[in-house]
Amino acid sequence: MLQPGQKAPYFEGIDENGNVVKLSDFAGKKLVLYFYPKDSTPGCTAEACDLRDNYNRFIALGYNVLGVSRDSAASHQKFIAKYDLPFHLIADTDLTILKAYEAWGEKKMYGKVTEGTLRTTYVIDEKGVIIDAIGKVDTKNHSSQIL
């Protein structure tokens, strides 16, 4: 996992609308960059809805919110529409961003070892430096962990 004080790795990806989103788009702004396994699964939905419900608090404090998963842009569109999410989601289908942020790797589920998305959140400051890294995400109360 990347650590606070490290420069955030450059990223460039496609959001749910096919628009290119880059780390440099957030220069001079604070960013909550969260990585999650899969659209519309119970934990990921709880996490996204908690961020949605607290979105105005993030905006008031000068934070942008951006989610990343390996799901397609079409899947992200459905997820956003179904749960009225006010932030963008990047479709990282080739795992480039997930790997750059060390949010892809080995994990154990029900005793079986697999490779997959490691639920992780990074808070990045206006200069592109990681100021917080959260690896043990409480999906129902994630906003409280961040704020």
Image: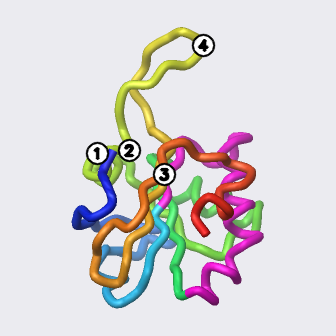
Question: Relative to 91, does residue 124 appear above or below in the rendering?
Answer: below
- Asked if residue 121 lies left or right of residue 128, the reply is right
C-alpha span from label 4 to label 3: 23 Å
> Quarter-wise, where is residue 84 in the image?
bottom right
User: Of marks 2 and 4, which one's residue comes earlier in the chain?
Assistant: 2
Part of the protein shown in magenta: 34-61
The residue at 67%/58% (across/down) is 48
Kindly check if marks 4 and 3 are in contact, taking CB atoms under 8 A apart as contact: no
Q: Which amino acid does label 2 sit on?
A: Ala
Q: Using residue 119 as the reference point, say whether residue 20 is left or right of it.
A: left
Q: What residue type is labelled 3?
A: Ile
| Helix, strand or loop for disc 4 | loop
Picture coordinates of residue 45, whole percent (x, y): 71, 50
Three-letter amino acid code at the position of disc 4: Tyr
| Picture disc at residue 134 | 3
Residue receiving disc 1: 99
Task: Name the N-terminal-most of marks 2 and 3.
Answer: 2
Kindly identify which numbered label has been placed on residue 16.
none
Is 5 drawn above or below residue 142 in the view shown? Answer: below
Indicate which label's residue lies in the foreground, 4 or 3: 3
